[in-house]
Image (tube, rainbow, N blue to C red):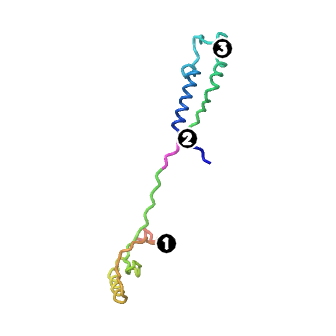
Amino acid sequence: MAGRILNRRELRKQADEAEARASQQEPEATDEDDEVDDTGDSGGNEEEGPGADMEGEADDAAPRPAKKPAKAKAPAAKARKPRKPKAAPRMRARWGVFDGSMKQVAIFDYNQRAAADEKAAELAAKKNGTFFLQMVKEPMPEPAPGDAPSPEAK
């Protein structure tokens, strides 16, 4: 069975009230009061000697939560250089002959537009249906390292 849902505001209010009551009953020393008095007259116990200050502070420190030691700062992270964007692959344009259902029937190089028009007209006459041309962009194949002409050959 699930417990009832706690009202966080009410719990916070109760915690603040309890803290206020505790501070009224037991006044805690502030940071300014923790400093040692140079006059030697602390207004407290007359039997206090040079080592008595440490004993008195130990009693006050017990109810106070222990301070955590300061963490060693990590060295500043190196600023990352932005990643160089990948170059988009080189694209080439070609003419595609498509049927009515957008299925590619044939493809021609861009400079062979006349041949692509003839193919679309031939298919339209031969088969009942609609055929049309559309430009298709596809990535260029990477040339093989041995096939590329060297710049010195020019």
Q: Label 1: which residue?
A: 144
Which of the pair 16/10 is nearer the observer? 10
Measured Cα–Cα span from mark 1 to mark 3: 89 Å
Q: Where does the image place residue 25, in percent across and percent down from the top left?
A: 58, 21
List x then y, in percent, for residue 29: 57, 21
Residue at position x 59%, y 36% in the image: 71
Give the quadrant of residue 114: bottom left
Q: Residue at x 56, y 37 (%)?
A: 73
Quickly name the residue at label 3.
Answer: 50
Residue 89 position (above or below residue 42): below
Frontmost residue, 92 versus 120 = 120
Ranked by sequence position, the earlier of labels 1 and 3 is 3
Which amino acid lies under the numbered mark 3 shown in the image of this protein?
Answer: Pro
Disc 1 is placed on an element classified as: loop
Tell me which segment is drawn in magenta: 76-80
Q: Amino acid at mark 1?
A: Ala
The kind of secondary structure element at disc 3 is: loop
**Vertical relation: 63 (above or below) 104:** above
Residue 58 percent location from the top left of the image? 65, 22
The answer to the question of whether label 2 and label 3 lie on touching residues, with beta carbons closer than 8 A, is no
- The answer to if 78 sits in the magenta stretch is yes
Horizontal arrangement in the rendering, residue 117 relative to residue 41 (left or right): left
Res. 6 mark: 2
| Residue type, label 2 | Leu
What is the C-alpha distance between the residues marked 2 and 3?
Answer: 51 Å
Of circles 1 and 3, the one toward us is 3
Residue drawn at x 67%, y 10% as measured from the top left: 47
